[in-house]
Amino acid sequence: MERIGFIGLGIMGVPMVANLIRAGYAPTVWNRSQPGIDACVELGATPADSPQAVAQTSDILITIVTDSPDVEDVLVNRDDAAIHGLAEGAVVIDMSTISPAVTRDVAAQLSQRGVSMLDAPVSGGDTGARAGTLSIMVGGEADVLDRCRPVLEAMGSTITHCGPTGAGQTVKLCNQVAIAGALLGVCEALSLADKSGVDQERMLAAISAGAAGSWQLTNLGPRIAAGDFAPGFMVRLMQKDLRLALEAGGDVLQPLPNTSLVQQLYYQLQSSGLGDEGTQALARVVSGLGQGVRHSS
C-alpha cells in the first residue's frame, strides 16, 4: 500500500486519519499542537517531529490546515517544510480550503522537485469526516487522481474531478457561496416564524419536504430552533472561506452580493466574541435585526 503522511490534526484531521487506519493504511502524522498527535497515536498512527520528517516516510502526503499561509508554511516555506523531505514521484493532496492562486503557486514549486499535487478540499464538516462520507472536490491531473482515488475513498463518498490545479479550490468556494445563501434564508425563515407566533419546528417540518428543502434547512434548522449553536464548522473558519470567495470573485469581476452580506453579518458575531460558535449562529444576528428601531414622530 502507499505510505501515507498526514499534516493537520484538528476537528477534521483526526477522524480522517481514523478512517485511513480503518481502511488499512498506517499514517505518519504531524501537527503544530500535541493533542491532535496524541489522539492519532492512540488510533495507531506514527508520530513525526516535523513536516519534513512526515514527508520522508510518505508516498502520498495529505494536508488539511487552516488557511493559505498555513499550507505554504508546512509545505514549502519553513526550514523543515515537507518539500525538503518529499521524494520524486510523491504526491501532495491538500484538503484545506485556501486560495486557488496560492494552490497553483505551491503546486508549481512542488513540480520543480518532481512532486505532483492535488487540491482536494472537502465538504461535509466534522460529521462527514467521522462517517467517511465527505464530498471531495479535486483539482489536478486525472492520472494522479486515479492513483490517489483509493486513499480519498477511505475518507469520502463523493469524489469529483473538477479540472486542473486550483479547480478544486474554486469549486469549494462555490460550495461555500451556496451554503452562505441557503443558511441566510433558513435563518430568516425561522425568525419570521418565531416573531409571527408560529412554532419553528412545525414550520421546518412543513417546508423541508418541499422546494425549500436543503441540507442547511434539514441539519441546521432544528439546531437553530433548539438554540444549539455548538460548532460543526466555526464562524471564524467560514469567514475565512467567504473572504477567499470574495477575493476569487474580485479576480474575475464577479459580484457576490449575498456572500458579502453574510460575511458582514458574521462580523457582528465575531465582534461579540462568538467566532467559535457554529455557522448556524448566524440566526442570532438575523433574529436581532430591527430590534430597538425607533420611529420618528
Image: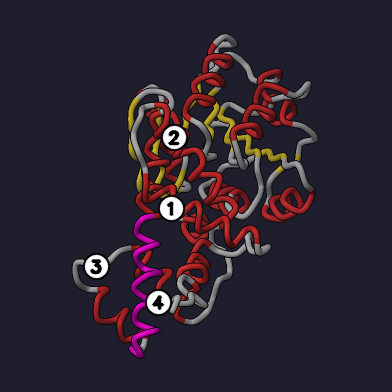
On-image quarter of the C terminus: bottom left
Considering every residue shown, the one lying at the far left of the view is 211
- For the residues labelled 4 and 3, the Cα–Cα distance comes to 16 Å
- For the residues labelled 4 and 1, the Cα–Cα distance comes to 17 Å
- For the residues labelled 2 and 3, the Cα–Cα distance comes to 27 Å
Q: Is residue 204 above or below residue 9?
A: below
- Marks 3 and 1: CB-CB under 8 Å? no
Q: What kind of element bears circle 3?
A: loop
270 vs 45, nearest the viewer: 270
Residue named by callout 3? 212
Q: In this view, does 193 lie above or below 134?
A: below
In-image side of 37 versus 281 (left or right): right
Amino acid carrying label 2: it is Gln
Residue named by callout 2? 169
- Residue at the spot x=42%, y=77% of the render? 222
Nearer to us of marks 4 and 3 is: 4
- For the residues labelled 4 and 2, the Cα–Cα distance comes to 33 Å
Q: What kind of element bears circle 1?
A: helix
First along the sequence among labels 4 and 3: 4
In x, y percent, where is residue 166?
A: 43, 27
- For the residues labelled 2 and 1, the Cα–Cα distance comes to 22 Å
First along the sequence among labels 4 and 1: 4
* 158 inside magenta stretch: no
| Label 2, residues with CA under 10 Å away: few <14, some 14-19, many ≥20 | many
- Residue at the spot x=68%, y=38% of the render? 28
Q: What stretch is highlighted in magenta?
A: 181-198
Q: Is residue 23 above or below residue 59?
A: below
In-image side of 4 versus 120 (left or right): right
Residue named by callout 4? 191
Amino acid carrying label 3: it is Ala
